[in-house]
Amino acid sequence: MRLSANQVRTIQQTADRVLGPGAQVTLFGSTAIDERKGGDIDLLFEIAAAVPNRAKALCRLHGALTMALGDRKIDILLKDANTPPAPVFEIAMRTGVLQ
């Protein structure tokens, strides 16, 4: 995994602040693999409850992470109680690193 302990802590704290305690974060994509290259951060946020306004939650997550981690490309997936199954979530969970 090519994130520092401080970056991982910042991501989890941001998830807790925006989505509430208990949000699970998975890092996937090239940043999750030490031997790979690539500068973007791919994150899957999972929460058991339904998120009433997904667009607002995604904007808040992205903005807070950009402010905390700097100007890096960040891709965010959000899976809540109302999210239907999709291959992208399965791939992220299977190949990612749980934070």
Image (tube, grey):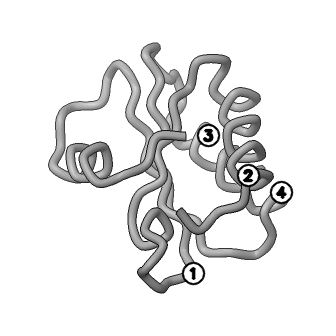
x and y percentages locating residue 71 in the rendered image: 76, 75
* Residue extending furthest toward the front: 35
Mark 3–mark 4 distance (CA, rounded to whole Å)? 18 Å
Front tag of 3 and 1? 1
Which of disc 4 and disc 3 is earlier in sequence?
A: 3
Q: Residue at x 21, y 44 (%)?
A: 90
Badge 2: few (under 14), some or many (20 or more) residues near its Cα, within 10 Å?
Answer: few
Instruction: Say if 99 sits above or below 69 in the image.
Output: above
Alpha-carbon span between mark 1 and mark 2? 17 Å
Which residue corresponds to mark 3? Answer: 56
Name the residue beneath numbered marker 4. 68
Q: Secondary structure at mark 1?
A: loop
Q: What type is the residue that disc 3 sits on?
A: Lys
**What quarter of the picture does the C terminus occupy?**
top right
Query: Does dot 4 land on a helix, a strand or a loop?
Result: helix
Numbered disc 3: secondary structure? helix
Cα–Cα span, label 3 and label 2: 27 Å
Query: What residue appears at the point 39 percent right and 66 percent down from the top-left corner?
Result: 29
Tell me if residue 83 comes above or below residue 97 in the rendering: above
Residue closer to the observer: 6 or 47: 6
Q: In the rendered structure, which amino acid carries the disc numbered 2?
A: Ala
For mark 2, what is the residue? 5
Above or below, comparing residue 91 to residue 30 in the picture: above
For the point 76% across and 29% down, the residue is 17
